[in-house]
Amino acid sequence: MSFDSLGLNPDILRAIAEQGYREPTPIQQQAIPAVLEGRDLMASAQTGTGKTAGFYPAIVAVSDYPSAAR
């Protein structure tokens, strides 16, 4: 799976690539689509698995398009 397949905005995808991220971690693969669909999310994963970096693109997308959060 790639970040491209997660339905993120092209600007966010470009920023992810510029930071050197190539593919989402398992927690990112599960969390990003759920957040983009506006679903509540409770997740846990080991330290260093990309939780914070994974949630940021989804949070930006939802804040840019508030109707996505409903």
Image (cartoon, grey):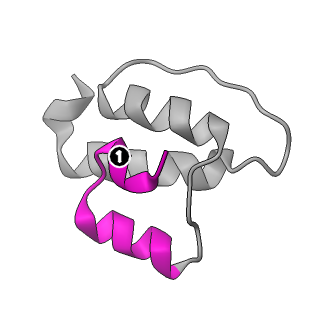
The quadrant holding residue 15 is: bottom left
Q: Is residue 16 above or below residue 65?
A: below
In this view, the residue in front, 59 or 7, is 7
Q: What is the chief secondary structure element of the magenta stretch?
A: helix
Residue 41 appears left or right of 50: left
Q: Amino acid at mark 1?
A: Ser
Residue occupying image coordinates x 21% and y 22% = 70
Q: Which residue is mark 1?
A: 5
**Of helix, strand and loop, which one carries label 1?**
helix
Is-magenta flag for residue 2? yes
Q: Residue furthest front?
A: 1
- Region of the chain picked out in magenta, as a range: 1-18
Residue 58 appears left or right of 24: left
Q: Is residue 14 above or below residue 38?
A: below
Residue 6: image location, x then y, percent? 36, 43
Q: Is residue 42 above or below residue 19?
A: above
Residue occupying image coordinates x 49% and y 53% = 56
In this view, the residue in front, 60 or 13, is 13
Residue 29: image location, x then y, percent? 53, 37
Binning the other alpha carbons within 10 Å of mark 1 as few (below 14), some (14 to 19) or many (20 upward) gives few
Residue occupying image coordinates x 40% and y 45% = 58
Q: Residue furthest bottom?
A: 18
Residue 45: image location, x then y, percent? 77, 32
